[in-house]
């Protein structure tokens, strides 16, 4: 399973108060909480307006991005890159995260050649990427997930119903940590790629762990959260993540965006990207594996 599931915590609470307006017998009501959230979201782009940063997803000029993310002790203990609470995480206008903006910046730089009418397989795509590819008339954006609606195709990443060597690029952004057998999923991604085609294979990485932490016997959501960082994660990748990708058959290029900032918004970190996050760009050898 590779669907990113939203966590909803249910607690006993009274019904929210409502505001009511209009004439008697013609009332429209809205929860005060809902109204407050709506007004806050409308005000945020104004409050954060500035010139230092730019969101590559919506084009907003900002004084900063918003901090955000989970605050589990595990994130600091293991120094997990690409997850947890961090500064400059969320765009106040379109709510894209820093890791989404990294993918968008990479695509805007045209760092990978995708032929005209090429197929880009995007697994569990974020809304910002869907909006971006909707404007790209020269490629077909194949949106895939296990359960989520409004996709091009629904499937399990471990068993993709796609022909061999049929895809020109794959984007798999923070998905493999959700998959029961990531080695099978990696092999499937390699199988469907055309020779020479590339895949962006991002995942949260524990900088303080040499090897990936995983235990198939752990199924309790609370224990998964404590050990892997999220209640639907089945592993926490360590510094061996790149080796796992290479062992799957990818020619791997670990791209440090800070070494070529002109392609990623320019200095000083105009897109608000995480300076510690790198891009894992795996290519299928031209001689098919």
Image (cartoon, rainbow, N blue to C red):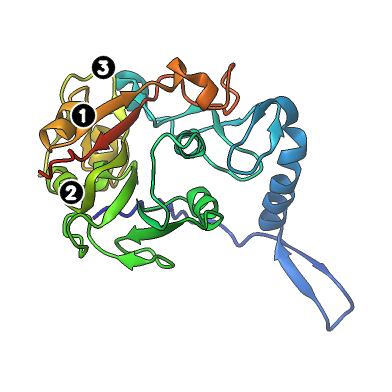
In the figure, is residue 171 to the left or right of 93?
left
Q: Nearer the viewer, mark 2 or mark 3?
A: 2
Q: Secondary structure at mark 2?
A: helix
Quadrant location of the C terminus?
top left
The residue carrying pointer 2 sits among few (fewer than 14), some (14 to 19) or many (20 or more) residues within 10 Å by Cα, namely many
Would you name the residue on which mark 1 appears? 241
Pinpoint residue 170: horizontal percent, then vertical percent. Answer: 32, 47
Q: Which mark is residue 208?
A: 3
Of the pair 136 and 67, the residue shown nearer to us:
136
Q: Residue at x 16, y 59 (%)?
A: 159
Query: Residue 187 location, x and y as percent?
Result: 14, 46
Q: Quadrant of residue 229?
A: top left
User: Mark 1 or mark 3, which has the lower sequence index?
Assistant: 3
**Of residues 234 and 190, the one drawn nearer to the viewer in this rendering:** 190
In three-dimensional space, the C-alpha distance between marks 2 and 1, rounded to whole angstroms, equals 14 Å
Residue on which disc 2 sits = 185
Q: Does residue 273 appear to the left or right of 153 in the view shown?
A: right
Counting residues from the start of the chain, the first of labels 2 and 3 encountered is 2
Near-viewer residue (31 or 162): 162
> Element at badge 3?
loop
* Residue 87: % across, % down: 54, 25
Q: Are marks 2 and 3 in contact (CB under 8 Å)?
A: no
Element type where label 1 sits in the image = helix
The earlier-in-sequence mark between 2 and 1 is 2
Image quadrant of residue 32? Answer: bottom right
């Amino acid at each position: 399973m590779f669907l990113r599931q939203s966590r909803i915590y249910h607690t006993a609470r009274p019904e929210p108060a409502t505001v009511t307006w209009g004439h008697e017998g013609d009332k429209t009501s809205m929860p005060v909480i809902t109204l407050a959230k709506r007004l806050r979201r409308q005000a945020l782009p104004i409050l954060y307006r500035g010139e230092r940063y730019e969101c590559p997803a919506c084009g907003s000029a900002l004084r900063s991005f918003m901090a955000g993310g989970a605050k589990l002790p595990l994130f600091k203990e293991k120094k997990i890159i690409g997850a947890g609470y961090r500064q400059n995480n969320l765009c106040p206008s379109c709510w894209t995260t820093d890791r989404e903006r990294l993918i968008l910046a990479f695509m805007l730089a045209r760092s990978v050649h995708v032929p005209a009418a090429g197929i880009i397989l995007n697994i569990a795509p974020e809304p910002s990427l869907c909006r971006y590819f909707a404007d790209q008339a020269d490629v077909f954006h194949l949106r895939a997930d296990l359960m989520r609606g409004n996709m091009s195709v629904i499937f399990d990443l471990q068993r993709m119903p796609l022909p061999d060597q049929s895809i020109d690029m794959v984007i798999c952004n923070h998905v493999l940590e959700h998959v029961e057998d990531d080695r099978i999923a990696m092999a499937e991604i390699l199988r469907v790629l055309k020779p020479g085609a590339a895949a962006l294979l991002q995942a949260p990485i524990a900088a303080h762990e040499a090897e990936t932490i995983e235990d198939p016997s752990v199924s309790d959501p609370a224990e998964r959260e404590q050990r892997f960082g999220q209640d639907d994660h089945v592993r926490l990748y360590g510094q061996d993540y790149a080796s796992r990708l290479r062992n799957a058959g990818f020619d791997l290029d670990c791209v440090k965006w800070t070494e070529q900032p002109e392609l990623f918004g320019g200095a000083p970190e105009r897109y608000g990207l995480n300076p510690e996050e790198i891009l894992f760009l795996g290519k299928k050898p031209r001689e098919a594996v």
